[in-house]
Amino acid sequence: MVVTMQDVARRAGVALSTVSATLTSARPVSAATRARVVAAMDELGYTRNALARGLASRRSRVLALTYPVGTSGLSRTSAEFVLSAAQVAQERGYQLVLWPFGVADEAGIVEVAGQGLADGVLVMEVHLDDVRVRGLRAAGVPVALIGRTADDGPLPTVDVDFEATLRDAVAHLAALGHRGIAFVNHAAHRVAEGHGPTVRAAAAYERAMTDRGLAPVQVFADESVAGGRAALAGLLAADEAPTAVITMNEDATFGVAAELAARRIAVPRELSVLAVVSSPAVSGQTVPPLTTLHAPGAQLGRAGVDALLALLDTGTPPPPALLPCRLVDCGSTGPVPAPEPALAGAHPQTPTRDGHRRPRRRPARTHTEELDEEDV
């Protein structure tokens, strides 16, 4: 059986990060503690990677990016961050490697980081209380974040400015006359886990709405097409259906678009849709293309790598950076729908309690029905 640093830590009665620090000399370890760790290594027959031993005293010219691919997948928007970071690292004379550790796998990431095969680690999908970040810091491994914990301390951080992004989204729709503005966020379990983007966007949307005297209506949708369809169906079934929907959930955004098409609801004539922290790759896959607040993926990847290299070169973290999203108008947002003229013998459309008209509630069609010209 292969002996790991976790085994050594248990035998020595120390933290995993202490074993890592003993091996890498990334931070001071007392002589007594170092002796316990070395004794445990000898007892267990722990052998450190030979290449890692050779690299301990010099730069490997390798940077690691940790992203929980297994649980989060790699969305088109996140892929922009990763590809940009890889390109910038190469421009700076480094190679970027992907470490797909889960957000709860502190032991795994500290074990690998302790081998000294990477000069520093860039962390994505950051949680408010992120054990990966905590473990790497305790082990003395240089770390930079694309995201923010609840208390980053001296760490270099770059992130989307969620406060400004949701404020801009609500302002854009309010300027078009909308008051019923709903928000389709990531799944509810993301909030419980403390996923930074989900939690920050949720709070920012609520503030943006209440600051304008508007009632927030937020849905935490499963991250799937089915989740997006269910979220929109629930919103349209409400007594006060929205006239505009903001989305920040890539797969659910496709579901929202699919449900609108199935109900033959014209965008933006009957309902406006705005995708935030998104990308043109997402926008262009719906009919009509969606207006987005485009995530600064390329800039974040570049800024993250540069922040990590600045820390490696100077030992001092650069100031945190919050980058705004940019509005790309593709025509899916428009004025509040005008009241429809009443048909002979029919009652006029009834306004909602806030005085705004709801989108027509057409039943969803079956999958065998084809789109016609009214759908686009």
Image: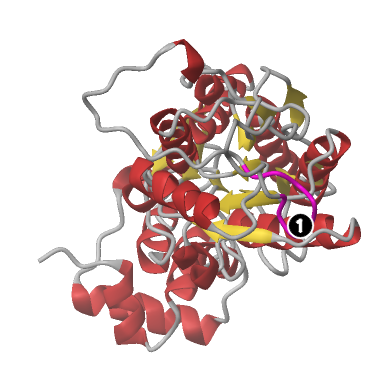
Q: Is residue 108 above or below residue 98?
A: below
Return the residue at label 1: 204
> Residue placed at 37% from the left, 53% from the top?
101
Q: Position of residue 203 (x, y in %)?
A: 72, 63
* Residue 375 visible at all: yes
Which of the two residues, 180 or 327, is positioned nearer the viewer here?
Answer: 180
> Residue placed at 45% from the left, 43% from the top?
252
Label 1: state its secondary structure. Answer: helix
Q: Is residue 38 left or right of residue 296?
A: left
Q: Is residue 92 above or below residue 263?
A: above
Q: Quadrant of residue 164?
A: top right
Q: Main secondary structure of the magenta part?
A: loop
Residue sitting farthest toward the front: 345
Packing grade of label 1 (10 A; few <14, some 14-19, many >=20) is some
Q: Is residue 353 magenta?
A: yes
Specify the segment rendered in magenta: 351-358
Q: Is residue 194 magenta?
A: no
